[in-house]
């Protein structure tokens, strides 16, 4: 991981601290998310996170708006050297 990516990751982890219990509950888990970002109307940017439900519907997991939505979108779409 590049240095700037490491600092971005640390910054994100500090912004969203995870308890020890939450971290343990994530071990040995795999998941896939669908992320949607909309800022097309010059209004308030919105980022929505969802996952496939039991049928073919998408269950909304979380939604972010404003600067938080823009920051998350930028972090998710920034190319890093992997």
Image: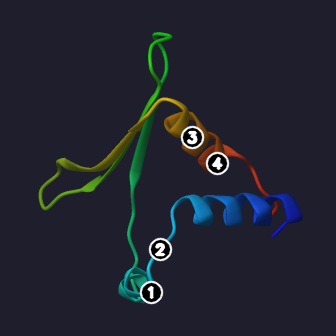
Q: Secondary structure at mark 1?
A: helix
Q: Which residue is mark 1?
A: 20
> On the image, which quarter does residue 73 sit in?
top right
Residue at the limit of the structure toward the right, as seen here: 3
User: Closer to the camera, 65 or 56?
Assistant: 65
Q: Which residue is mark 4?
A: 75
Question: Which residue has dot 3 on it?
Answer: 73
Count residues near mark 4 (Cα–Cα under 10 Å), then give few for <14, some for 14-19, many for 20+.
Answer: some
Farthest top residue?
41
Against 43, is 52 above or below?
below
At 68% from the left and 63% from the top, the residue drawn is 9
| Label of residue 55 in the image | none
Q: Using the rendered image of the protein, determine whether residue 3 is visible from the camera's viewpoint.
A: yes
Residue tagged 2:
18
Residue 67 image point, x, y percent: 55, 32
- The residue at the point 87 percent across, 65 percent down is 3
Does the CB distance between marks 4 and 3 fall below 8 Å?
Answer: yes
| Residue plotted at (56% across, 45% down) | 72
């Amino acid at each position: 991981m590049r240095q700037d990516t490491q600092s971005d990751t640390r910054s994100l982890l500090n912004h969203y601290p995870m308890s020890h219990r939450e971290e343990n509950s994530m071990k040995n888990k795999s998941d896939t998310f669908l992320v949607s970002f909309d800022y097309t109307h010059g209004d308030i940017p919105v980022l929505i996170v969802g996952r496939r439900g039991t049928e073919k519907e998408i269950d909304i997991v979380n939604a972010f708006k404003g600067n938080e939505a823009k920051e998350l979108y930028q972090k998710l779409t920034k190319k890093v050297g992997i």
